């Protein structure tokens, strides 16, 4: 019988402390470092240096306190972190690039405590570039200032690194004792370090000098020797390297003593390294997986169906039961280690997966079932990948599964206190559906598809029963009620929200609004997009249930709110600032007829009804809902409110945000604000925005006519200057920008369309100067009287009246 690869859920991460932060880190950063403690109870997540927000999280399964630390931007963060193999209590060590090392422990006092802090580097100016923690030791590669000359052709810093080691020992109350520093390698290139159970692999980095970038080292502390290997050449040499005996090597001297290793070769083009108990796995950019064993031998395991796409993308490698597991992006491939044959290929629901080896036997009895398999960790949970062994597996019959599933279903709907059993369903004629289905399946083999479908449901029912028992016992009631509310909301959103289901949903939201909203958030898959808006990846069927359920002109029965109004009310209580983005997203998701009425109220009006009667609503929320509604009357109403409050810039931005798809609405907003501009000078500072809002089809004469209709009436003859304290009048200088905006960019070739357009065009060069003629000097008697130049009944006024219109 052919084996079948299985993915079994071990934990959905809800039993880990800090589950929310754990899921957020796993889902948000594909390059986060993940490590598992020796006892299998702790998970360590560390963002690499250079991440937008440096963060360390140690989550614990079951009772215990998590450790969470964050470093502001610009402050140094740990280069790496490791669990220490102390079975008595959990402990970890953090190492910084500067050489600072901190040992943290838990168990003696509540929470995590800093047990010890020390400096790894001796001299100043040293920099740690890589660190590993093989069993009972701390090994790091540090860069030192080079004080000697390098051979010709080598850069000054090519061999300015050294590899050092210190022992780690448990020592009573302080927790950990670090031994003295011993240098393993002098004058070596930079190495990346990876530790397996017995060996330490030193592999070249992207900055390693190309002449030695095809060489890697394998140090076996228990054997006291180092293997220098060149996988591309098929060569390996062994040398003694035992710190207890004082052994140390100069890297350049070590290579000179090994013939054949310095043959010109291309650097190792490796996408992913992964240490395993069998050796070091290498995945190159062609999709070939190789295994470098502890003795230096190298062999090709197999080739993946899909090669890595450059440096981008995550990959994880592991070995279990003679099978190679490779997660590349969202694809899991299982290859036979002996033949390299592809055994199975699975497509995962996420591309951010980390492989964890199971803890050693005897450390955690609850994890013994995972021996022989690999653990897959993602934001969706902790899974075990292994082979399904059908021998001796007793599966329940399809008939039994039908009655067990029906029993759980009817028990949820039943109002009686007595427990319903599968035996009662078998002999009770009230429930015909499970008996009919059982009779259909009777006599057939147990269907694997039905078992697979019902297994997740049965597991949920079992966890729900355990949660109920926990609440009855009074253990951690607050967390239990929260989890129960989340389960109930998630279940109700999968049903038709009418009648009793809708009433029950209202009850849950009233009793536990935070938990209910959290479940709705996951069901709708709501996420902020960074611009103050929300996005959703939920299917349309879910949105149809949320947005439906209201009838135009009718109040909800007995005060029961439809799902959309219920969510809006919950948001008003918890996070009012997210109500307008949520309504705007709902308007984008809504389909025709989803309002369950003819034609149905717009969603923004349904949200406004939740806020209360007109005049008693929060003004800020009402404005945001009106502006985001997309309805012309609502947007115009919001702009009028902004004008009344003299929030000119926001009113102009509301008009500009409409875009060219709403020309009539933009024109109405422009006319409204133009009237305000004609009556007072409080809009003068925002004249550039008003010019941008001006419709392109408005001609200068139309603009002047619009202004004239809003200008205040003249009560007397015009004065050269405004009265003290009076509003300054509108001038031609203020109008110039608007008049230029309404004109064309170049002088038209046809006839002048407006009598005012000539004043806007600049001919470029002035007309030619007419020829000068001698002018006869007039006598005083020949000059006309000044009063003859003035019209009858008026004197000549020589006052400068400026540019008044």
Image: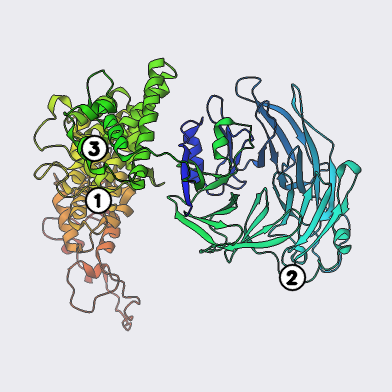
> Around disc 3, counting alpha carbons within 10 Å, would you say few (fewer than 14), some (14 to 19), or many (20 or more)?
few
The image quarter in which residue 374 lies: top right
Please identify the quadrant where the C terminus is shown. bottom left
In the rendering, at what x and y percent does residue 253 appear? 89, 59
Q: Residue 730: which disc?
A: 1
Q: Residue 495: which disc?
A: 3
Between tags 2 and 3, which lies in front? 3
Q: State which tag comes first along the sequence, 2 or 3.
A: 2
Residue 711 at least partly seen:
no
Give the alpha-carbon distance from disc 3 to disc 1, as whole Å: 64 Å
Q: Residue 249: which disc?
A: none
Residue 96 vs residue 15: left or right? right
Whether residues under marks 2 and 1 lie with C-beta atoms below 8 angstroms apart, the answer is no
> Around disc 2, counting alpha carbons within 10 Å, would you say few (fewer than 14), some (14 to 19), or many (20 or more)?
some
The image quarter in which residue 478 lies: top left
> Around disc 1, counting alpha carbons within 10 Å, would you say few (fewer than 14), some (14 to 19), or many (20 or more)?
some
Vertical comparison of 600 with 305: above or below: above
Q: Residue at x 21, y 54 (%)?
A: 666
Between tags 2 and 1, which lies in front? 2
Give the alpha-carbon distance from disc 2 to disc 3, as whole Å: 64 Å
Q: Residue at x 35, y 27 (%)?
A: 484
Residue 755 vs residue 580: left or right? left
Q: Residue furthest front?
A: 443
Q: Nearer the viewer, residue 391 or 264?
A: 391
Q: State which tag comes first along the sequence, 3 or 1.
A: 3
Dot 3: what SS? loop
Residue 279 at least partly seen:
yes
In the rendering, at what x and y percent does residue 345 appear? 47, 57
Q: Residue at x 88, y 41 (%)?
A: 244
In the rendering, at what x and y percent does residue 357 appear? 60, 43
The residue tagged 2 is: 265
């Amino acid at each position: 019988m052919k084996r079948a690869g299985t993915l079994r859920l071990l934990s959905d991460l809800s039993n880990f402390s800090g589950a929310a932060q754990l899921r957020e880190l796993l889902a948000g950063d594909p390059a986060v470092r993940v490590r598992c403690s020796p006892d299998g109870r702790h998970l360590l997540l560390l963002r690499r240096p250079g991440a937008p927000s440096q963060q360390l999280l140690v989550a614990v399964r079951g009772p215990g306190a998590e450790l969470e630390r964050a470093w502001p931007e610009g402050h140094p963060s740990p280069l790496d972190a490791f669990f220490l193999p102390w079975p008595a209590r959990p402990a970890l060590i953090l190492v910084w690039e500067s050489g600072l090392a901190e040992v943290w422990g838990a168990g003696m006092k509540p929470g995590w405590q800093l047990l010890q802090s020390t400096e790894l580097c001796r001299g100043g100016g040293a920099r740690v570039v890589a660190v590993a923690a093989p069993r009972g030791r701390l090994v790091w590669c540090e860069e030192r200032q080079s004080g000697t000359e390098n051979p010709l052709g080598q850069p000054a810093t090519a061999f300015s690194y050294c590899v050092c080691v210190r022992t780690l020992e448990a020592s009573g109350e302080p927790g950990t004792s670090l031994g003295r520093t011993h240098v393993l390698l002098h004058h070596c290139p930079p190495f990346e370090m990876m530790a397996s159970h017995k060996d330490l692999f030193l592999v070249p980095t992207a900055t390693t000098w190309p002449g030695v970038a095809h060489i890697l080292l394998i140090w076996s502390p228990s054997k006291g020797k180092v293997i220098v290997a060149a996988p591309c050449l098929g060569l390996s040499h062994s040398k003694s390297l035992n710190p207890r005996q004082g052994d140390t090597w100069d890297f350049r001297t070590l290579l000179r003593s090994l013939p054949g290793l310095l043959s010109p070769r291309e650097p190792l083009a490796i996408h992913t390294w992964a240490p395993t108990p069998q050796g070091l796995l290498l995945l190159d950019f062609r999709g070939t997986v190789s295994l470098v064993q502890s003795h230096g031998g190298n062999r090709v395991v197999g080739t993946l169906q899909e090669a890595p796409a450059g440096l981008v993308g995550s990959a994880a490698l592991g070995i279990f039961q003679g099978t190679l597991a490779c997660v590349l992006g969202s694809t899991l491939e299982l290859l036979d280690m002996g033949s390299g044959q592809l055994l199975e290929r699975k497509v995962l629901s996420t591309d951010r997966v980390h492989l964890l080896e199971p803890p050693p036997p005897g450390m955690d009895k609850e994890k013994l079932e995972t021996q022989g398999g690999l653990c897959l960790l993602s934001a969706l949970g902790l899974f075990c990948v292994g082979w399904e062994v059908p021998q001796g597996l007793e599966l329940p019959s399809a008939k039994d599964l039908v009655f067990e599933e029906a029993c759980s279903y009817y028990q949820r709907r039943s109002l009686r206190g007595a427990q319903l059993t599968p035996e009662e369903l078998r002999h009770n004629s009230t429930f015909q559906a499970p008996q009919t289905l059982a009779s259909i399946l009777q006599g057939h083999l147990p269907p694997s598809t039905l078992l697979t479908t019902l297994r997740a449901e049965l597991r949920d029912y079992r966890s729900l029963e355990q949660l109920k028992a926990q609440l009855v016992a009074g253990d951690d009631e607050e967390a239990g009620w929260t989890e129960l509310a989340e389960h109930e909301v998630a279940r109700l959103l999968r049903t038709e929200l009418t009648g009793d289901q809708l009433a029950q949903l209202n009850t849950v939201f009233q009793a536990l609004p935070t938990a209910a909203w959290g479940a709705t958030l996951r069901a709708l898959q709501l996420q902020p997009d960074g611009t103050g808006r929300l996005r959703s990846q939920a299917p349309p069927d879910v949105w149809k249930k949320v947005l439906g359920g209201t009838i135009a002109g009718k109040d909800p029965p007995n005060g029961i709110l439809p799902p959309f109004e219920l969510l809006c009310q919950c948001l008003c209580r918890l996070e009012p600032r997210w109500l307008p983005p949520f309504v705007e997203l709902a308007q984008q998701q809504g389909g025709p007829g989803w309002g369950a009425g003819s034609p149905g109220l717009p969603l923004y009006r349904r949200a406004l009804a939740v806020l209360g009667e007109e005049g008693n609503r929060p003004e800020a929320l009402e404005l945001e809902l009106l502006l985001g509604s997309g309805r012309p009357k609502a947007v115009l109403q919001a702009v009028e409110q902004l004008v009344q409050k003299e929030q000119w810039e926001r009113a102009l931005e509301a008009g500009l945000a409409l875009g060219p798809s709403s020309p009539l609405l933009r024109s109405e907003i422009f006319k409204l604000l133009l009237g305000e501009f004609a009556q007072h000078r409080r809009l003068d500072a925002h004249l550039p925005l008003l010019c941008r809002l001006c419709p392109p089809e408005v001609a200068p004469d139309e603009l002047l006519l619009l202004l004239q209709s809003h200008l205040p009436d003249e009560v007397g003859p015009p004065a050269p200057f405004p009265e003290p304290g009076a509003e300054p009048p509108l001038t031609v200088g203020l109008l110039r920008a608007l008049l230029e905006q309404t004109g064309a960019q170049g002088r038209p070739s046809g006839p002048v369309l407006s009598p005012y357009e000539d004043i806007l065009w600049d001919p470029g060069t002035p007309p030619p100067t007419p020829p000068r003629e001698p002018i006869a000097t007039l006598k005083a008697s020949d000059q006309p009287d000044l009063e003859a130049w003035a019209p009858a009944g008026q004197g000549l006024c020589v006052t400068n009246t400026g540019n008044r219109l």
